[in-house]
Amino acid sequence: MHTDARLLPDHTHIEGDICIVGTGPAGLSIAMEWDHTPYKVILLEGGGFEYDDQMQDTYAGPLTGQRYYPLKSTRLHYFGGTSNHWAGFCSTFDPMDFEKRDWVPHSGWPIKKTDLDPYYAKAQNVLDLGPYEYDVQYWQRKDPTLTSLLETDNPVAWNKVWQFSPPTRLGKKYGDAVKKSKNIHLYTYAHVTEINANEPVKSIEKLTVKNFAGKTHTVKAKYYILACNTIQNARLLLAACPQAPKGLGNDNDLVGRFFMEHLEVQSAWLHLPTPKPLKLYLFQGIGGTRMRCELAIHSDIQAKYRMLNGTCSFAPWELAKGMTPPIKMWSSDDPRKNEDSMKRMWHSHEGVTKAEGYNVYELKTRIEQAPNPDSRITLTTDHDGLGMPRAQLNWVLTPFEKYSMRTLYELIGQQVGLAAVGRIQLMDYLRDPNDHSWPSTTGGGWHHMGTTRMSNDPQTGVVDSYNKLHGVSNLYIAGASVFVTAAAPNPTLTITALSLRLSAHLKQVIQRAG
Amino acid sequence: MTPFCKSARAEPNAFNTPDFLGAICDSQTIRRIGTDYRASTPAEAKASQLTEQLEANLDQNKDQTEQLEAKIKADFAAGRTITLEGWVLSLTEARQCALYSIQNP
């Protein structure tokens, strides 16, 4: 069922068993797991069902450090959250992404890839993907024309599969089901501004929600899940608990730190002596599933070269040249204008790919950012329209990311040369190993991660391996803020899988508690 | 763009003709790569020095182009690569470019 919190009498008291804050991929995927259960689920959305600029403005905040997109326009503050403008790119993290890597400071999750596998499989359905198959040979058996650039058993590089969601707008997909649900109570225009804990901050007692209609309400539940975006989760912990002035769960000064993005930058060209279609690396529809591959580096080679995990994607140079880099295109505070600009540019560069293929492909990097405590979210003294301190992002990159990008292409260049299929040419900014500067084209994938990282040790993490806030018995965090490392893939599939895992765990907790 | 294969002023031979690279880039690029190699490797700045390196371990009774192709492959396999003008190249083909740049200024 649905209630517009603007229409409730002021100071309404709302109660339930579980309160989920946020209706993006994390919040909605969890909520739907509780439909038709005996538990009353309170689902809070700060905005409504459509874009609302006044609500969107609560996401605005200043930027320092590496140039970045305006914060107001990177996330969407209405039902369905940022799934309302995501592009649908999905792939799984690699087993190595969860491991401690001695060359990547602050790496190592308290869970393994195998812990997530069952939930990845389930998340495929939430995001309307194909079968849980990320082995390239599965897809090559379906379409034998999807030949690999390098031998499939190449010891250095491998083909990492991506699948593409339509992309699913989760608000549209689940909106009717939520409204019809008897036990999920959706409140729109219920923006959390305060998290009230008991003394001495061992459990949460209630939340305060506000809206621009001037209404303030309280929400009480047995368990709370903050399922907002990475910046908002950290912002709420830092700003919203009067009983924890230094920040809820922030005894070790970790909340807001380790903000990560994926570096997505045009980096090199692949030159071929004769045109090749490279179908495997371009979008393909196979049995109703859209997929493609990117080239990745095997984990033992990453260890040998002490590099970060990243991939390279392919675009025919003939079609890609002249495209404005996203960091220059996505410059407005209004996400709708940015999206329109992006779509116009994509359409203007669209073309029917030639069956015989191309001689030159542009290679674009998608690489993890190393966890870095100085890359962080803090609060400003400025407040948004609902009285919350705004979030500020200081995005910090290091020479490690650039070294890893260069090494990625040098390794692929060696393999392409060895196979005598072509040669790799690095773009200008990657050529000098002593140049640690970033070109003006450097941007992120709009993927915000880190800030409430997962660790079983409160000294090194904000939440435990089941997403529970350390030191607080009934508050969980869902979303990419719990990521310890960023891996190469776009985060939505992993956000959804982790959320489903949290949901399953919470069902056990609530059942045990009786 | 001048195709590499039609650009040579000096008589093309196995040593000054990076065949594979010549199929994907023009003569000016080959020349720039070669010049860059000579600048970065002063000990191989002369034609005689480059020829000596290229001839090393070649069997004079066998096809030199084929042997140089094998050398290029071995370079890539062993990681004996160098990045010049952004191109990730085998050391052998970088030397071929360098020789080309001397003989076709």
Image (cartoon, coloured by chain):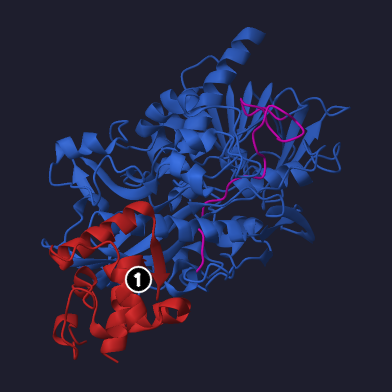
Residue sitting at 31 percent across and 85 percent down?
B101
Residue A199 can be seen in this image = yes
Q: Nearer the viewer, residue A265 or B74?
A: B74
The type of residue carrying mark 1 is: Met
Residue sitting at 56 percent across and 69 percent down?
A438
Q: Position of residue A427 (x, y in %)?
A: 41, 71
Q: Which residues are magenta?
A: A441-469
Q: Is residue A149 above or below residue B32?
A: above
Q: Residues within 10 Å of mark 1 (few under 14, many from 20)?
A: some
Q: Position of residue A513 (x, y in %)?
A: 66, 9
Disc 1: host chain: A
Q: Nearer the viewer, residue A228 or A6?
A: A228
Residue sitting at 23 percent across and 63 percent down?
B58
Q: Chain B in the picture: what colour?
A: red
Q: Is residue A54 above or below residue A479?
A: below
Principal SS element in the magenta part? loop
Residue sitting at 33 percent across and 50 percent down?
A294
Left or right of A195 on screen, residue A298:
left
Asked whether residue A193 is drawn in magenta, I would say: no
Q: Is residue A130 above or below residue B49?
A: above
- Residue at image mark 1: A345
Indicate the chain coloured blue by its letter: A
Q: Nearer the viewer, residue A357 or B75?
A: B75
